[in-house]
Amino acid sequence: MVTLGCSKNLVDSEKLLCQLHRSGLRVVHNSEETGADIVVINTCGFIGDAKEESVDTILNFIQAKERGEVGQVFVMGCLSERYKTELQNEIPDVDKYFGVNDLAKIVESIGASYSEHLIGERFLTTPSHYAYLKVSEGCDRKCSFCAIPMIRGKHLSVPEEQLVHEAEFLAGKGVKELILIAQDLTYYGLDLYGKRRLASLLEKLTDSKGIEWIRLHYAYPAGFPEEVLVLMRENEKICRYLDIPFQHVSDPVLKNMRRGNTRRQSYELIRKFRAEVPGLALRTTLMVGHPGEGEKEFRELLDFVRQMRFDRLGVFCYSEEENTWGAKHLQDTIAEDVKQERMEEIMDLQAGISLELNRDKIGKQYRVVIDRKEGAYFVGRTEADSPEVDNEVLITNDSDLAPGTFVHVRITKAEEFDLFGELEVTPSTGNTK
């Protein structure tokens, strides 16, 4: 099993792996091993670079198949859903193509038995102390640049009781940190219950024994359910952390993007977040080079980053995606080198902001979860850091710290995107922040 793309794809792969393992098959994930009877590639089809990586991976395994190193090659996921006909014509040596909702078909095509009672159960590929919890599928938003609604369909929430069952299953496997993910987390519940129910879901998830941190990814600025902020402030299990992609701040660009919010609303929302939840760590994603972004609009975006001082920030360059609203109605006239320069300018600014924020942490104590041992350091994360995308804390310590252990660390040194610290007290598994 080979998984490309985002954490939502990873959850899909984990559910497939669970089905296959329960059928008695030996399955390895993202392994360098050869000799597999079947290779299943879970692809990404979101942006140009991801599509290119997916195609290259398929071609590499087709070559391995021709050399006799693997047997059949199956392709699933977003790229296959979006371009199945084209892929069948261009890469006919793939044995079977599947879409994003073909789990049962894949299981049966491999020769295993699909089990309905395994819904909510997964074979974890992350370190055993954290896992992603996908609370919904698809998206009802109409953003000009995004192909997800075409690939994944309309927003579909997973019922609360099913998510609670899945959380309890994960906790039983030793998971201590749940990372909630969706295309649009803040929309959760509208389709099932007629109103946004993210806060209700969070309250139920905090009752899961063994879960110590719950982290929120991929919120949406328009229509944010503000009752979540009260829970985040008052419930120790909900991390004071929010991943909320603003994409841009200039009104003309936001209008072209069809984001449904304005510059003023963006500033006001961030100020409300910080007033309601002291110490909140904000991660955002921005896009440069979208049609309508002139020099004036880009300077507005730079000023937004400078004033809001996000704790974590990523930037993408706009790339026109077939059949999206933007591709049909807007002209992509901004040169690629200009987009790249703008992206680098924002990241340079953010690096300075991140260094200043990190230096402010020197001498302070933080609760840290240990992720792994690496060289002379134990590597962990604070409440303000999500795995793989955010800062890490490198801890010097002679004792043995198992992954998933919570410790208190005093920060001694700071770099742009890393912290260094020393163990302050005996490892703790309590819920104290």
Image (cartoon, rainbow, N blue to C red):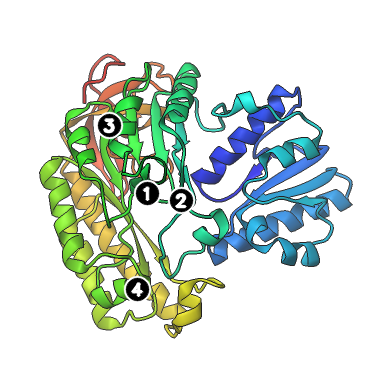
Separation of disc 2 and disc 3 at Cα?
Answer: 24 Å
Q: Earlier in the sequence, mark 2 or mark 4?
A: 2
Residue at point 53%, 55% (across, down):
153
Q: Earlier in the sequence, mark 4 or mark 3?
A: 3
Q: Which residue is mark 4?
A: 342
Q: Is residue 44 left or right of residue 354?
A: right
x and y percent of residue 133 in the render?
A: 45, 35
Tags 1 and 4 touching, CB below 8 Å: no
Separation of disc 1 and disc 2 at Cα?
Answer: 14 Å
Q: Nearer the viewer, residue 57 or 114?
A: 114
Q: Earlier in the sequence, mark 2 or mark 3?
A: 2
Which residue is situated farthest in the left direction here?
Answer: 275
Q: Quadrant of the N terminus?
A: top right
Location of residue 56 by image quarter = bottom right
Q: Amino acid at mark 3?
A: Ile
Q: Which residue is mark 1?
A: 218
Residue 217 can be seen in this image:
no
Q: Which residue is mark 2?
A: 155
Q: Which of the two discs, 4 and 3, sits closer to the camera?
A: 3
Q: Quadrant of the C terminus?
A: top left
Tags 4 and 3 touching, CB below 8 Å: no
Q: Is residue 234 above or below residue 351?
A: above
Q: Amino acid at mark 1?
A: Tyr
Location of residue 205 by image quarter = top left
x and y percent of residue 358 in the render?
A: 22, 45
Residue at point 59%, 49% (across, down):
4
